[in-house]
Image: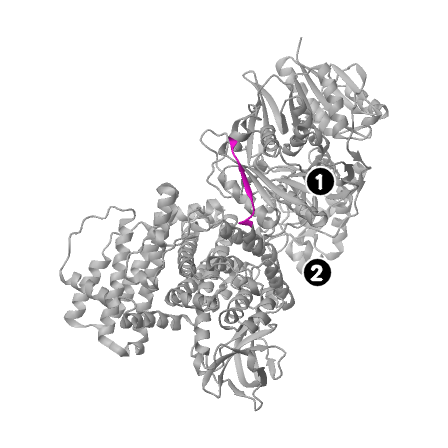
Amino acid sequence: MATTATAPQKKIVGGNFLIEETNPRDVFTPEDFNEQHQLIEQTAEEFSQQEILPNADRIEHKDFAFSRELLKKAADLGLTSVDIPEEYGGAEMDKVSSAIIADHIAKQGSFAVTFSAHVGIGTLPIVWFGTDAQKKKYLPLLASGEWVGAYALSESSSGSDAMNARAKAVLSPDGKHYVLNGEKMWITNAGFADLFVIFAKVDGEKFTAFLVERTFPGFSVGAEEHKLGIRGSSTCPLILNDCQVPVENVLGEIGKGATIAFNILNVGRFKLGAAAVGGARTCLANSIKWAKERKAFGKPIADFGMVREMLADIAIGIYAGESLVYRTVGMMDAATADIEKGSPDESKLIRKAIEEYAVECSIIKVWASEMFDKVVDNQVQIYGGYGFVEEYPAERAYRDSRVNRIFEGTNEINRLIITGWLLKRAMSGQLPLLPAIKKLMDEVMAGPSFAEEDERKLATQRKALENAKKIGLMVSGAASQKYMQQIADHQEVMGAIADIVIEVYAMDSVLARTLKLIESQGEAASATAVAITDVYFSEATSRVEAAAKKILADVAEGDMLRTQMTILRRLTKAEPVNVIAAREKVAARVLDAGKYAF
Amino acid sequence: MKILVCMKQVPQKDAPLKLNESATWVREDVGYEINEPDAYALEAALQLKEKNGGEVVAISAGPARAQTVLREALAKGADRAIHLEDDKFVTLDAFNIARAMAAAIKDEAFDLVLTGLQSDDYGYAQTGVLLAELLGWAHATIIMQVEAKDGGIRVKRELESGYFQHVEMPLPAVLTIQSGIGKLRYATLIGIKQAKNKPLRKVSYDEVAASLRPNQLTIEKLYVPKKTKQTEVIQGTPSEVAKKLVAKLRDELRVI
Amino acid sequence: MAETILVVVEQREGKLNRVSLETLVGAQALAKQNGWQVEAVLLGSAAQLDEPAKEIAAAAVAKVTKLESDALAAYTPDGFVAALKAFLAVSEPKLVLLPHTYQIRDFAPKLAASLGSVLVSDSTGARFENGKLLFTRQMFQGKFSADVSLAGDGPHFASFQAGSYRADSLEAGSAPVETVAAAVGEIRTKPEAPFQEAKAAVDLTQAEIIISVGRGIKEQKNIPLAQALADALGGEIAASRPICDAGWLPMERQVGSSGQTVSPKLYLALGISGAIQHIVGMKGSKHIIAINKDAEAPIFEVADVAVVGNLFDIVPALTEEVKKARG
């Protein structure tokens, strides 16, 4: 369905979606994939179907030699090195390609995690922060899959609060080594990785990243964890016992480890989102197949309305997830398009450009992991009793999905990041949040207006989105006024604001994609997309309203609360949409196609 | 060895096909992919090139969308491509498609033309043989292996009932390749990047129109075949049942 | 004079193949519809043609021609096309029908093209409708059927898929046999003798015939019963999950959602009830024969042929019968 349209060029400010109306033409969508993207998608998809899925059980039984072999095969195709420059043996392509790979490799939870730990957090720190010598030494090995990478930030007593790490580094008397002591925990790929990015505090103070080879003296790996899910991936503690790391293996600057950690997480987060979308697509294909084959009361369960509702919900989750992920990577590509290839600060500029979208990355991480959890839950339900036993894919997917809400920053931490980042940008004036809030308040005080009817396509949805943005601004303003600098201490409020911001970005992305689709393919061909948009908006509006009520009840009282509730009611007033008919349209489409097909 | 590979774009295998309004073809709003047997023809060509050197050129006739097939071929290692681009090519019969392709390559000197043994849509299994006739070259069909030998080639043909046969022939020649002759390669990311800059020559309908004749084969009507699956119950004593089953296996299924 | 339908009859080492007889039946049916006549032609060396020509001459055809040459003893597209082209120039049939075998598909398009005609390949039937000759053939791998017609004066060419007509309804008669020395020009290809290959390691997805056992086999010591049938049929043995879980057969032989998905020509299910997880792995088979003692077993829903009975009685009898048929 992809068109030959050129990708949007406009450079967007991070968080801008909350303030301004989005022009769909500035938004990258899966329909904008070019020929290269389509071919990459095909290679990744075929690789997954032919090499990963048939070996799912082998992977699940921790046959790590096999997982390494698979990584190597993927590397031979270039799938592991899309973010690595060509001069270091990489395939070096845009972030849309990077997301496409993360998306289509994610067919089997365990291997998806092995893969992304190697490609993302295991390799990227060197790409972005390594010296030329470090890049020359390690990147070709990682790009070719000869070596496997891992990333060690967490400790038993510090997970989300990574800066509280206890691992320590001291310079040896001869100045040639740092001597590392301490332990790291929940390290993906630890069981077989060759190179670790390990964070430790120099002299117990300066948080710093080190490149540690498995064979360095004093380095050892503990026993495998027994996990709820992704059991075929390796997760072990690391033990650093006078581990000797040459000084040239310090990654980045001494004391600048936090910058590395945060930057890497941004990429980890959008890739996690892409992987969740890919996992959901597999669930949908399995669920459709099952629902058509499984009979009850003499007919396939795919004929039953409540089963069809669940299938539709999975498809809607995928559509929205794609919209979010590819829009965001599209913005990254537009922002990095002018960076000169091979220039000395290329990596730094790319990293900076991506950092601009930190809040979008966090949104994707939270939204997609929670979407995926609902999808795997629906899948178990569709499979019924068969969904509860190991022999069928539903059970494993259900377990595998859960970790997504925990790693790459828990969803709670990411919610704090979202709201905190926005408020910080607002305070500093980088994002004109405060003027927007003021404008809204003036508008509200002026009373209801009778603006001209919006005659554009999907006018109702445009209005709902505009109102959701207003609600976000209103409650942010109210909460900031009430708690001022102490707002960070009111996590529940921060979280609820994040919930609204997340929904706004999701709605904005879904609507932009659907509008763009209508423009390029006409209304008839976009009917299913419109149905998806209807359902998504209906549900998201309710969630926004609920979050707003929760915040307002906490930050206002008496007349103030009553006034704000009046405004909220005005902003949420809408005719109910027939979501039953809309879901049915979506279900009919995916059942006809036998898979997600938009 | 200079090798031409004929590749067709067909609806995806699992695509939910629907008839067009006149019920003479399917609706176009489905996903497309490389005709699988042609993918094996490409694989065979790439392997021959790896062994003997030379050039692999992919050719396809079809609308703009068919270019995807050629890009994929280029990404997998073909050196250049020829696209006979027009919606009208879809409705040509096999003889005319062969005429169009023969016209498009008249100024080139290929040693070998490979096609898949048949297409997954029409399933005529003729284009390769027709090309051989038009070009005046030797040919062989349903080929499992190709090797260069004494300036010509030696191929392994699949025959029926598990038999095979080696055939030698001079070049130039046309071969139709059997599916499954080896594992199909993936397009690597580097290959995909390089494909963008490989030459792709477009040939318009008008350029080859003089070589075409009116279609002789017309699809009058396309329809969904009537479901005939009805379970036949076989009864009797064990030896009666055995006799009836054997008759069935021999006369209807032809597996004995 | 009535128009002629010429049937190109295929022989291998002096033996007729069944599809040729079926094609003759098709020709007879068409001829009857329009008052045309059927002739037959065979190609090969003199020694190869005597017996099959006699056999065809005993059918209701107007004439049988032996197109003889030692150069036709081994099939080559050049030889066969040259011989037939010259023969067609003389016999001038309106319609040429051929069995859709591997040999025919190798040369028939070339033959038709050499006369400026188009072949309708792999047809499953033909009929005259309002004076127009329509052929039926499958398209999109059987998802659709198509009625196709041929323009021009002919000769028209069509090949018939195996099983399109019933060989046993060939009408008997008595026809003169003529011998024509074939005109064979230059032959560019050098064919070697056909050969068979040793069986490779098991790949159920490629198997043409699969004999599959389920819980109904009861004990491991009964597996050889099924194996014997598989050997007689030249097929592979497979099983449903419980059998492989029990270790009675290796896992690689398991068919179903957690095993292989197969689509052989023949899937013979022995004592398999047909749980959904098994059905998904084999329902794409071309022909499914199920033997089960439970008449309500779900396997019968997907079966083409159902045998309700005791497999321990039926399978040995079937094995014997297959061996007899194979000679």
Q: Position of residue C79 (x, y in %)?
A: 77, 27
Viewer-side residue, C27 vs A82? A82
Q: Which residue lies furthest to the right in this view?
A: C47
Q: Where is residue C160 in the image (x, y as percent from the top left)?
A: 66, 28
A560 left or right of C266 in image = left
Q: Residue tagged by mark 1?
A: B143
Q: Residue at the location (24% across, 68% down)?
A: A434
- Judged by depth in the image, the label closer to the viewer, 2 or 1, is 1
Q: Residue at the location (68% across, 19% down)?
A: C28
The chain letter under disc 2 is C
Which label sits on residue C247?
Answer: 2
The magenta stretch spans residue B197: yes
The span shown in magenta is B195-205
C4 left or right of A417 in image = right
The magenta stretch spans residue C177: no
Q: Which amino acid does label 2 sit on?
A: Gly
Q: Position of residue C159 (x, y in %)?
A: 66, 27
Residue A467 found in image quarter: bottom left
Q: In what element is the residue under mark 2? A: loop
Q: Which amino acid does label 1 sit on?
A: Ile
Tell me the crowding category of disc 2: few under 14, some 14 to 19, or many 20 or more residues within 10 angstroms, Cα based.
Answer: few
C242 left or right of B206 in image = right
Classify C172 as above or below C214: above
Q: Do labels 2 and 1 share a chain?
A: no
B198 left or right of A327 in image = right
Viewer-side residue, A519 vs A458? A519
Viewer-side residue, A135 vs C156? A135
